[in-house]
Image (tube, rainbow, N blue to C red):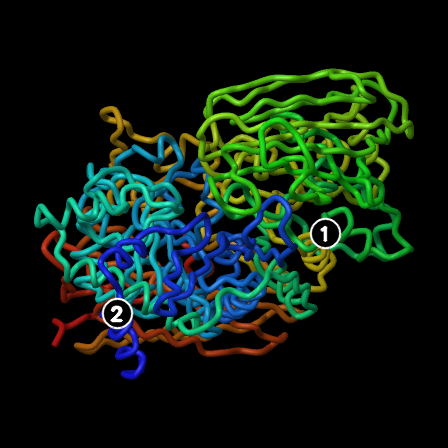
Amino acid sequence: MPEAENERIEELLNRLTHEEKVSLLAGSGRWSTVPIDRVGIPRLKVTDGPNGARGEDENHGLTSACFPAGVALAATWDVDLVAEIGGALAEEARAKGAHVLLAPTVNTQRYPRAGRSFECFSEDPYLTSRMAVAYISGLQTRGVGACIKHFVCNDAEFERRSMSSDVDERALHEVYLAPFRAAVQEARPWCVMSGYNRINGTYASEHPLLLDVLKGEWGFDGIVMSDWGGTYGETTPVGGLDLEMPGPARWMAAEHVDAAIASGDLSEERLDDKVRRLLRLLARTGALGAAGPSPERADDRPEHRALARRAAAESIVLLQNRGGMLPLDPGASAHIAVIGDLAAHTPIMGGGSAEVNAHYAVSVLEGIRAAAGSGTKISYEIGAVTHAAPPPLEACFVTADDGAPGFTVEYYANPDHAGAPVRSFTTSKSRLFWRSRGDGFVEYHEFSARFRGTFTPERAGEHLLTLGAIGGVTRLILDGEPLLSGGPDPETAPTALSVTLDLRAGVSHELVVEFASVGESRFRMLEVGHEPPLPPDTIERAAEAARSADAAVVVVGLGGEWEGEMLDRPDLRLPGSQDDLVASVAAANRNTVVLVAAGSPVEMPWADDVASIAQIWYGGQETGNAVADVLFGLADASGRLPVTFPKVLEDAPVPELTIRSPGHNVYEDGVFVGYRSYDRDGVEPRFAFGHGLSYTSFAYRDLAATADPGGVRVTATIENTGDRAGSEVVQLYVGSPARLGSHPLQELKGFRKVHLDPGEAATVDFVLTVDDLSWYDGDGWRCDPGEYEVRVGRSSRDIRLTGLVEVPAPS
């Protein structure tokens, strides 16, 4: 930072009173810090990511671009592309008036059932590091701060606010801290978010790692903020946390800060350091001296659309392609049967803080129809539903007062729907959240809302309507008749009501839903669900459609109901009857393609019975177009797995959390996370880490490895031996034969994504430093001299070239 800026920060710091300094240690509301108008300190605004910039109001806010989820970005293995997305996300954050994007998530995909795996990049610390550095660099180059999260070992959702991740020092440093270390030392993020969890018994927001390692050893000079509500006691001000979110202050309130100062646990110098870091962040983002955050905008940019489509296409991993069935040739496929609830309602993002109000969403069915052309018949069958509970009532069945799809919603500044509404919106959502007090246009602890719309069923038959609520009294009224009502209720036990109605297709009904806030909860929710009638033989109908088609494309997977915050998956199976659906379609048509829309592995008992399988992840707003690009060969299949897919849950290194005592999850796998454990135990995965097929073929040759006291250089030549252009991800793994047993067989230490035309060859060059070859022995990092094996290939289980190199002692 320029010296003049540092002087300005010190001048502001010196002008602040003690009370003003303390006020800056917590937010003013859900998304902003406290302004100090007297000295010209504006509020700092943050917004949720990591695959978009949501803005302040998740219920009625403006739309945003939705990019692929973190795991999908890692599946591209393309650091330049991820940096581009970081830059686009900076533009999105600025459009929402935000200075900081709460992203990226750099936790480790250790536990395959973890609810937020889709947000994380990988099971491997090196791949996670490279993705994180690229993402942060792209974001901050455009003047928006990155807030990397969740520091550290926040790797499951089960009891996340109390669970202790008990991990040994070696695994902590080599696996879980490693991506944070690389991000901090190479990309220099401006913010770090602490996790909800405890680490070896101490809450992350109070853990000595914040001072000793993050700010001390690594020299982090940015701000450490809590996860939302992730502070737990009076000792919070004493540690390395700088900003408690959201506001108003709880444990960073003046009474606790002043008590810590009076006891000598918190010095005035440390208090100044916390405030100085916030001022530095304001300066870095250009907020210092500005009037304040700008108004929010919805910028649906053509270049963001194109980037989102390219990224989603590059993320798709072709897992299996028997007989070269893919790419499909529209000219040779007169009839394609598209099957699955998720084909028409493709999930483009996971649940929780990763959700944004997307500009639009292209389903797989829409993408295939657009790409196939008029000469190909596209039929559709739902096959099997995926949800556990009736999904939110779709806006396409409801019309608001202004004629737009959705509800007219009116808010009242009292719990009785009394007087004139203070604000009115049209919303396309039938699931809404209110997460904090005093933020927005009403006080969320004392408000009411009424939703009105004209409900017109598309199909005749029995329609199930449901009403769910947390933190309030609610009722549903149809054509003037109250049908459902309930509440109040505790925060953890939502009201769940339902009614079944025999309705006629095309006949409209006046639907009103009311909600009245009750109590002091920080979280409130309202959801109107709708299950339209379905024929009893949906799987049979899907199989019949497949039988008459040239090819069948079945879309299965999960979605935000199964992958999101505050829940882990019960198992790795596809929910509902999706496995039966795939089996029936595959029996009817041997040319069956299965597309899996999920952010983590699923079991595939039907894998041997289908021709092709592709993992499409949560690809963002352009998912359907990107899938069509890959299916029809307009884009190469160039994604590679950033996580290992087991055949069954029991094959995974961590099928269950290891709860040895209440509140303690023991990381018994140590450094053997992901593919390292499969290698050690000789377990054959369904699909290996790094795996992914292409529409062309590649040959590997001419491996060379040389070493000196500064590290190792490895080169290899890759040639496209197929008849079409394609991209290959060349992966470098390193192991030390002398250290086997206590060390992994191999560890990813380099990769390159290269695009080659038919017959073209390229030499790929890797340079490994001493740090790349080091391990943590409990007291610090060490690099052992001796013989190392370098392994170059297409995945952790498809090694094409191997060689030995003698590494001398570091100089």
Return the residue at label 1: 362
Amino acid type, callout 2: Arg
From this view, report whether residue 305 is shown above or below residue 445: below
Using the image, tell me which numbered label, if any, was put on residue 701: none
Which residue is at 61% across, 55% downward? 66
Amino acid type, callout 1: Val
Which residue is at 18% across, 43% downward? 168
From this view, report whether residue 457 is shown above or below residue 243: above
Task: State the image quarter where residue 285 is shown.
Answer: bottom left
Q: Nearer the viewer, residue 189 or 796?
A: 189
What element does badge 1 sit on?
Answer: loop
Return the residue at label 2: 15
Circle 1 residues within 10 Å: few <14, some 14–19, many ≥20: many
Which residue is at 60% across, 17% downward? 486
Query: In the rendered view, does 755 fall on the left or right side of 163?
Result: right
Where is residue 561 shown, x and y percent of the image?
Answer: 57, 34
Query: In the rendered view, does 391 fall on the left or right side of 520?
Result: right
User: Is residue 376 in view?
Assistant: yes
Cα–Cα gap, marks 2 and 1: 53 Å
Q: Nearer the viewer, residue 300 or 689?
A: 300
Q: Nearer the viewer, residue 802 or 778?
A: 778
Quarter occupied by the N terminus? bottom left
Q: Nearer the viewer, residue 800 or 270?
A: 270
Where is residue 487 shown, x and y percent of the image?
Answer: 56, 18
Where is residue 534 shown, x and y percent of the image?
Answer: 79, 24
What element does badge 2 sit on?
Answer: helix
Query: In the rendered view, does 486 fall on the left or right side of 463?
Result: left
User: Is residue 746 in view?
Assistant: no
Mark sitting earlier along the chain (2/1): 2
Where is residue 646 shown, x and y percent of the image?
Answer: 45, 39
Between disc 2 and disc 1, the foreground one is 2
Which residue is at 74% across, 38% downward? 407
